[in-house]
Image (cartoon, rainbow, N blue to C red):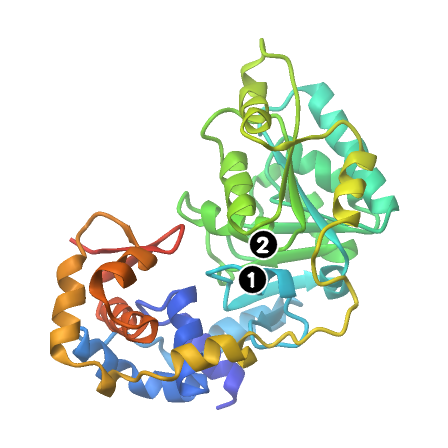
Amino acid sequence: MNEDFDRLRLIRSANIGPVSYVQLIRRYGSASKALEILPELAARGGGKAPRISDQGAIEREMHDVQKLGAHYLFLEDTYYPHLLTELSNPPPALIYRGNISLLSHPAIALVGARNASAAACRFARDLAHSLMDAGISVVSGLARGIDTAAHQGSINRSAIAVIAGGIDISYPPENASLQEQIARDGLLLAEQPPGTEPKARHFPYRNRIIAGLTQGTVVVEAAPKSGSLITARLANEAGRHVMAVPGSPLDPRSKGCNGLIREGAILIQSAEDVLELIRHFDDHAAGADIPKDLFEREHHQSKLRETSSEDVDEAARKALTGLLSMTPVSVDELLRQSGLCAASVQMILLELELAGRLSRHAGARVSLIG
């Protein structure tokens, strides 16, 4: 079996999330070796061996991807977007159709309300078109309203759509033709396997990809507690620009954007406002000769490979587990209270996760599973 097959098998195995995937590859060097060690690690975490994905299921998935004219982009691949690797939980594998070179361009996320006003949709469409003309990739989530307008404005050359379900599933159904056009003329990205119907739990994962791919996120109309504000929060956590278009205080669809501006988001009125910001964005510029391999970063390697399962004693495991509860707590707080080194804490958390006893949350927080 080749390494891509083993990578996908590891990704699709139970209790393997983006964080645990990265840690396993860093520690053991390859997906095949990580698969071999899973039962031992889970046992140390006090649980049964996780269900490893069936080889036949992986073969069928890879066949389906090929049949759809799609391709895999793994975290270890040269063309995996550098900005996305800066997330704490980058997707280990993406499935794509279309022009992969769009990922090398500077990019801006453009998101907003599904029930957006006609004026807001027009603004989003014109903004996306102007950004496209400036050579900027425009990233959105193919939802109704602002997302649709953003794709329509950039469809000719720079539309990138990140969807919550499988690459072969159109959602919402009325955007099926737009989705197909983006797959042909732009770039369509999915984290879920083909055939996956989008569920509520998939959308926050999609949103973190939208935020992670881009130098900044522009929000055009958003109700409080909307998915667009989640994307903005994720962008802020990733150290990216958060921008918002102001609206009437009488329109509830403007409350989210006005609230973002009040909290420090940058007020946007034109494409020039956006372009001025990203000209000064201290990122790894598009086309620069940058090492793309997340697993060769020395500052990670030295911390994570200094401790193995065998180096962590039972007293340390018991002490750290005793600090955990069903209330999420930051890993930094666990480091402070446990007195253990970072590598030991990460090793114990990895064992607990593989044992099915630990859940990871946004903001590098963890909790026990009840």
Report if the CB atoms under discs 1 and 2 are less than 8 Å apart. Answer: yes
Residue visible at 69% across and 58% down in the picture: 283
Quadrant of the rendered structure where residue 272 is?
Answer: top right
81 left or right of 152 in image: left
Question: Mark number for residue 86?
Answer: 1
Foreground of the two, 127 or 7 = 127
Residue visible at 47% across and 80% down in the picture: 301
Real-space Cα separation, disc 1 to disc 2, in angstroms: 8 Å
Can residue 330 be seen?
yes
**Residue 193: % across, % down:** 49, 63
Quadrant of the rendered structure where residue 228 is?
Answer: top right
- Determine which residue is flagged by label 2: 212
The residue type indicated by label 1 comes to Glu
Instruction: Name the element at disc 1.
Output: loop
Foreground of the two, 125 or 323 = 323
**Residue 28: % across, % down:** 40, 86
Q: Who comes first in sequence, dot 1 or dot 2?
A: 1
The number of discs equals: 2
Q: Is residue 355 above or below residue 239?
A: below
